[in-house]
Image (cartoon, rainbow, N blue to C red):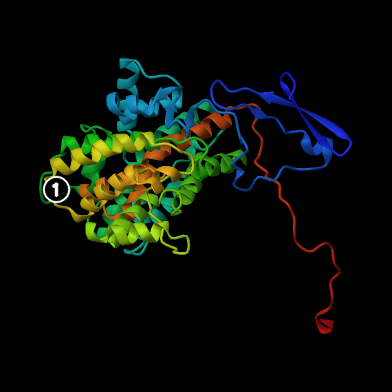
Amino acid sequence: MSGNTSQLQVGDKTVDMAIKEGSVGPAVIDIAKLYAQTGMFTYDPGFTSTASCESQITYIDGDKGVLLYRGFPIEQLAEHGDFLETCFLLLEGQLPTAAQKADFDYRITRHTMVHEQMARFFQGFRRDAHPMAVMVASIGAMSAFYHDSTDISDPHQRMIASMRMIAKVPTLAAMAYKYSIGQPFVYPLNSLDYTSNFLRMCFAVPAEEYKVNPVLSRALDRIFILHADHEQNASTSTVRLAGSSGANPFACIAAGTACLWGPAHGGANEAALKMLEEIGSVDNIPKYIAKAKDKNDPFRLMGFGHRVYKNYDPRAKIMQKTTHEVLNELGIKDDPLLDVAVELERIALSDEYFIEKKLYPNIDFYSGITLKAMGFPTSMFTVLFAVARTVGWIAQWKEMIEDPSQKIGRPRQLYTGSPQRDYTPIGRR
């Protein structure tokens, strides 16, 4: 390296590549012209050493356990703000003034209803369809209902599409849940805040009045804040890749939702809860700890460690407190799953094996327990993740569309198949 450039020796050729500095975090080596200069590509499965874009939205320092939205620590936003304030921050880059917050809340609240024909759209699904399958389809179908906000070249239409998705995805999620349990859809209520409205749409029935528990509403709001964005993860990268082709925003968010469905991504909290159920009781923990330490045993502890965080997940600390607030509010003190979770947490923070491998409890470990206590079935966990992450996807999509240097995504490959060969007629094979 010399100055602001890096040199790569390829055979007898020396290639100069610019070094670009971020505001915080590691610098990057610009390899955009590498192929033109050397005839070679880089090889990076999973893109774990490749910056796919330049972004000003979210920053993660996995070694230090730091997560910043537009420079603000996640702990401060979760403790002092609400989800819609976080939405405004991610979209606009700054925290809103009181007037901006009131206007933003008003506009989101009055976009929560979906087109009435979408109710009939739901009837095409089997009752036992996974809610995430319904979400992928219904979010994508929004482009068939809202033609006036699909022109990505129009800033006003981009804004309207953003508002619509933040407002309507919770309504679609509640409809997916209601449809799966055979209950009637509950319309949004403009007098309620974002998460209280969502809880009511999920759990109210026409036969009686529903009162929102403020502790549960605040807990869910915090869960939404913690999941709102997480830099260039698999689903966000999917949204950006889909958007790079010029696809409409509803299609891009549907693509991100489909990616999120994977058990290694959004399905991790569901997997963590299933693991706790499999362990069953505190008495069984030593056996499962031994299985986890056995390299030849396929069992893995879910909800521990993180691909990015090599320290305690900062979101997990907030979720730990939130989990206990919810369980105390609901009077759940003798839940065997919680007993298993607490003991596993204690072991993970004191056992040399876990400490050495930095297998700290992550956000999925706590969120699954919390959502179950609130009354959500495991099939809805990833749906709730999608509700929260929608704003992050939109902010990242919007940033990409407005970036003059963006171009259609086109990863390269290392081809290891057969070289060219000639076709042989079927009778001679």
Q: Secondary structure at mark 1?
A: loop
> How far from the left and from the top, in percent, is residue 321?
24, 36
In this rendering, the count of numbered labels is 1
Asked if 370 appears above or below 402 in the picture, the reply is: below
The residue at 69%/45% (across/down) is 43
Identify the image quadrant of residue 277: bottom left
Identify the image quadrant of residue 194: top left
- Residue extending farthest to the right is 12
> How far from the left and from the top, in percent, is residue 106?
30, 26
Which image quarter holds the C terminus? Answer: bottom right
The residue at 84%/63% (across/down) is 420
Asked if 65 appears above or below 383 in the picture, the reply is: above
> How far from the left and from the top, in percent, is residue 273?
31, 54
Could one spot residue 413 in this view of the protein?
yes
30 lies left or right of 119: right
Residue corresponding to mark 1: 332
335 lies left or right of 362: left
Asked if 404 appears above or below 12 in the picture, the reply is: above
57 lies left or right of 301: right
Residue type pointed to by label 1: Ile
Could one spot residue 117 in this view of the protein?
no
Which image quarter holds the N terminus? Answer: top right
212 lies left or right of 220: left
Give whichever of 156, 352 is nearer the camera: 352
